[in-house]
Amino acid sequence: MDGKCRVGVDIGGTFTDIVVVESNGLCLTKKVSSTPPNFALGIANGLRELLAENNLSPQDVQEIIHATTVATNAIIEHKGAKTALLTTRGFRDVLEFRRGRIPDLYNLFYTPPPPLVERRLRLEVDERIGAKGEVVVPLDEASVVAAVDRLRGDGVEAVAVVLLHSYQNPRHERRVGEILRDHLPGIHLSISADILPEIREYERTSTTVINAYIGPLVKEYFASLQEQLNAMQISARLLTMQSNGGIMSAEETRERPVAIVESGPAAGVIGAHRIAQRAGFNNVIAFDMGGTTAKASMIENGEFSRSTETEVGGGPSLASRLIRGRGYALNFPVLDIAEVGAGGGSLAWLDRGAFLKVGPRSAGAVPGPVCYGAGGEDPTVTDANVVLGFINPNSLAGGAIKVRTDLAEKAISERVALPLGLTLLDAARGIYTVANESMIRAIKAISTHRGRDPRDFALLAFGGSGPIHAVELARALEMKMVIVPPSPGLLSAVGLLEADMEYHCVQTYLASTVDLEPSGVSEVFQQLENRAREVLTRDASKAEQHAINRFADLRYVGQTYELTIPVPAGALTRQDLAELSEAFGQEHERTYGHRAGLEPTEIVNLRLIARALVGKAVNGSQQVSGKKTQPADRRVYFGSDHGAVSAPVLTRSQLSGESRQGPVIVEEYDTTTVVPPGCGVRLDDWNNMVIEVQPVDKGQSNGWR
Amino acid sequence: MALNVKLLDPITYEVLQNGLDSIVDEMALTITRTGYSTIVRDVLDFATALCDREGQMIAQGLTTVVHLGSFPDPVKCILAAYANSIYPGDVFILNDPYGSGGIHLPDIYVIKPIFVDNELEAFSCVVAHHSDVGGRVPGSMSTEATELCQEGLCLPTLKLYERGVPNEAIFAIIEKNVRVPVAVIGDLRAEIAAAQIGERHYQRLAAKYGALTVRKYTAAFLDSSEALARSEIASWPDGAYEFTDYLDGDAVADGEPLVLHVVVTIEGERVTVTFPKTSAQVKAGINSPLTYTKSAVYGAIRLALGADLPNAAGYFRVIDVVAAEGTLVHPRPGAPCGARGIVGFRVMDAVLGALAQVVPERVPADGEGGCSTMSFGGFTADYRPFVYVDSLAGSRGGRPSGDAPEAVPHPMANQANTPIEIIEASLPIRIEEYGFATDACGAGKYRGALAINRNIRNLAPDAVLQFRSDKRRFLPYPLAGGRPGTPSSYVLVQGDDRVLLPTMGARSIEQNAVLLHTTAGGGGWGDPLERNAASVQADVWNEKLSVSHAEREYGVVIDPITLQVDTVATGRLRKRLWAAKSLSVQSRG
């Protein structure tokens, strides 16, 4: 063994997960408390301990790949830089207008989130570019210089520049950038043509503003992390997970911090994707349930589902285009992840009509579920899971957390069972089922709402609570198989080590496909490709590792939303364009149930995803840092069909390739897997638990009677 | 009723409710993604819902409030007209405001009966505002039309599909009677696709749980909504609450103000809304058909009931709307109604004004009065027809608990704006300003939202402009001692010629004509002298209010250079204003 190792670090709001993989494949893991606001400190501490415990030296660390919520938190908590925005004369309020519509129809008191740049710092310059890129009003440089005085006087730290139609002609934006650089050296500058050369001014403005707003903070974070690593004498290069599921160097991330806003959730999906690939599953729904939310994402034909538009800072979202408006628009490539406010800590409550609801309010890390005995009073999903016998009634996380079943029982009795006239167990089962219902919405949002049938997919469950709920979710959606990977609670950190380097770029290119000259399209793709290869090479990847995929956003002439369709490599022909148009028609039919026959289509954007295939499989045996407990059999309630039954409690290593019939509870350091009666569980060659889900008879759905 | 609900399995209840809610949202999503016109795909002027077999709305998409409240009437008209001849595979189409339950001609309903095992179970309902249905002006919302017939193509309740077979004649007639057939047929196809998705998913739910179970539970959703509304209204003090609002006038009768008088009577668990002194119907196309009036009333009451009612419309049952035929809010058949939005908005505003006396903590001051809609069309330089509909709103009134946030649209039509870059890339139009109008809001302890400026240049060789606004003379009403909002305006600039347009009308305009539009600004809530000086200072610092406005409206003296509050001068000024105010109250008393 040469002692070399790679490190994956997933930094969450509460815990930081660290995974170290040695060159012999041995995998070491550790969970430590996060240390906000200086997250770098927590990483350094955890890493130092993990290395020391395993006799590794800092010099052995070759690279550190991490996922961070630092950018998201800055937006959610409004702790970003003091940011200014320069716009075309007449349009400084585009940012505050947003798209108008609010997500609460009958709420007269709805208040949208405040703009990230206040009106005083939104300044206008004299210029105008038309829709075809023509200069309607030349840039008056004096108006830019006038704005500089205001920026200086108000102590602005970052500036976003967004001029109308700059995706067609970026010259004015770039010149404004030069003037700002000359007058305000060192200021963090985000130019919309660099960040998102894409039509729709609000979305482009919001995205560019977010980039500026989090820029200084992300830069500072990386500096601090680098400093910590230097102090530990770790000279490994530092890479970061982006929202799109690819990794990027720290340098590149500093340029486009907007790319890492959904860093954390993406890592889990990558982990799920790699596991599914190895185990031979092409169609998988990745399901990640943590303390406050549950997330679902689709992997179809071995490919991620991606989105180029999302929203940040608005709380959990179903990734629906309809219920937009709670957060800030962010049009940047992300893995398409639907999120609902249902996690282990979500609170159960009764609404005005005395109906049982779960979430979105959460007990959070403090006080946490009632059963943690830290002062929580309202029952949570975790409390229900304790009462049902799913979760170890004595302790969790290798004894780190003591469990008070009596407190959970009392809370559920008083606040749910009594008012609803249910038994304690049925009330707990009700909480479990209603939470499942909410999670089903997340899964539907990325499946049925996109015209995909969940029955064609396996459910890959991870996160602290995912494997407790997965089989019932699968049942409700008539999915046939659940996969629970090794160390499901650490899958995100593992995913980091398996990710490839990725660079996504886009250029708006408005053209009808009917009379389009293919060479023009090829040329733009070539420019995008050159830029992407340059970035990847700068990040020390080799040309032979590069993989380029091209896409075009198409729509029928007259529509406003596009579908993204793959484009073949090489110089394009008229035939290619005709096939592109046909592929769009088929996708339109598949997604929306109809297509418009002979109607002409048009291209809106050209997109390119460049990858450097640097990820390495993590499939060695895993060692968990922490104490192990010896589980005992216990009574578990699977709904009134089955009543309370005695279920064996096993560890993963006690399972085999032979299917074992439920009920079985599989207890591990970081999570519990529930296999209900009627379902069989086995291990596959990669140490994944594979659970065959048996459908419930009609009328017995959700085990509730 | 509540008892009934208790007998049901609470979990199935939740599952089915979520199931129906996601169906109507998915229907809406389908329209957004596949619609063609800016008014449908960007502004989102449409609605989706599921109604039960009797036409009661059991789930509504997150769409347009005033559309949602309209669904029961067209479904009931279908049931009445086709009692024994509704078949699986049928799709109904209609827009007739008199006899079919429509609300004006541009709003075309597409309604698909849902059958399970050959039994009619429900209706999948869609309505979308089409960019044009013919008639005298582009956009088909003429304020000068004097008969329905001038407003475009009128479709009574027809079968667009019978047993799955399309009636091509209807498609052909529509295509030849509208200015922009590609957009209209494209939007219509989006509506049909959405209705089909609603049907398919409802059938799946019924297959899983049994059609009778779904029926039992949807009845319970309605009952639960009704029961919650009843218990809420029971807690409101009984009485008759009056409110009078005005429209500046219409485009035919030349500036004669119109009266919108409502009486909201709370009696036990029920609400009755009447319009005793409301003006008679007018010659101009702003009359509000009864379905539309009712929908605006339902919306207003639901807003005051609080946000957490279930998504089924059982609360309609406790509301009676009584309007005499021949009035502005219940015109006789054949009366023009293309631009009835303006009256509908005023109905909602007036009912809310009355409810502010019932539940003052739940009702903000009046806002911009709903969308100022202008449409604009003709032919491009290469003689392609175009129609553009621009709907501008977003200045609500101050709230009992705080300022109105900027740019939140009127609650009756929760619409989105259209990206300027998208407009300019597809139409011969340039937008030259889209921003807040400094100082243009009603002062108050909690101020109204700022008015909006939007300036639009016509680049086509010539075009016809149709515009509709209000609240230039009768301003958005304040509450609790606030100041009224600020007036709207329309100015047309052609060459050196600068004309203040009336609030409504139509004009031919030349190339490069610029329309300067300012909406009304929101009314204030509470006495402006009670507004925190720091809040006034923050607005000045943020360039939303000027130094002189702060002094004049709030008595807050701010140094124009440092932008700091002069505390001493402010104290002195506010004291003087207080004294003047109490003096005037005394002299009035």
Image: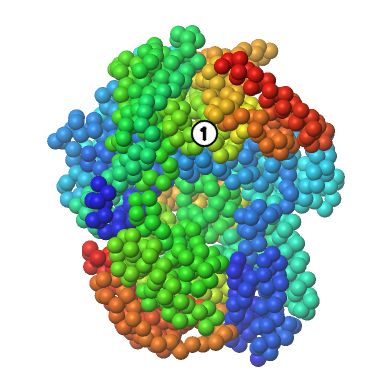
Up-down relation of residue A278 to residue B133 (above or below): below
Color scheme of the displayed model: rainbow
Q: Residues within 10 Å of mark 1 (few under 14, many from 20)?
A: many
Residue at the spot of label 1: B364
On the rendered structure, is A489 left or right of A39?
left
Camera-side residue of A308 and A133: A308
Q: In which quadrant of the rendered view does residue B527 lie?
A: top right
Q: How far from the left and from the top, in percent, is residue B496?
A: 68, 13
On the rendered structure, is B212 left or right of B22?
left
Q: In which quadrant of the rendered view does residue B252 lie?
A: top left
Q: How far from the left and from the top, in percent, is residue A279?
A: 45, 77
On the question of residue B342 being in view, the answer is yes
On the question of residue A132 being in view, the answer is no
Camera-side residue of A683 and A439: A439
Q: Residue at x 52, y 42 (%)?
A: A110
Q: Residue at x 43, y 37 (%)?
A: B303
Camera-side residue of B460 and B468: B468
Q: Residue at x 39, y 67 (%)?
A: A412
| Amino acid carrying mark 1 in the image | Pro
Name the residue furthest left: B84
Q: Residue at x 36, y 46 (%)?
A: B310
Q: How far from the left and from the top, in percent, is residue A100?
A: 54, 38
Mark 1 residue element: loop
Q: In which quadrant of the rendered view does residue A608 lie?
A: bottom right
What is the quadrant of the C terminus of chain B in the image?
top right
Q: How far from the left and from the top, in percent, is residue A4?
A: 68, 84
Up-down relation of residue A163 to residue A695 (above or below): above
Q: Chain of mark 1?
A: B
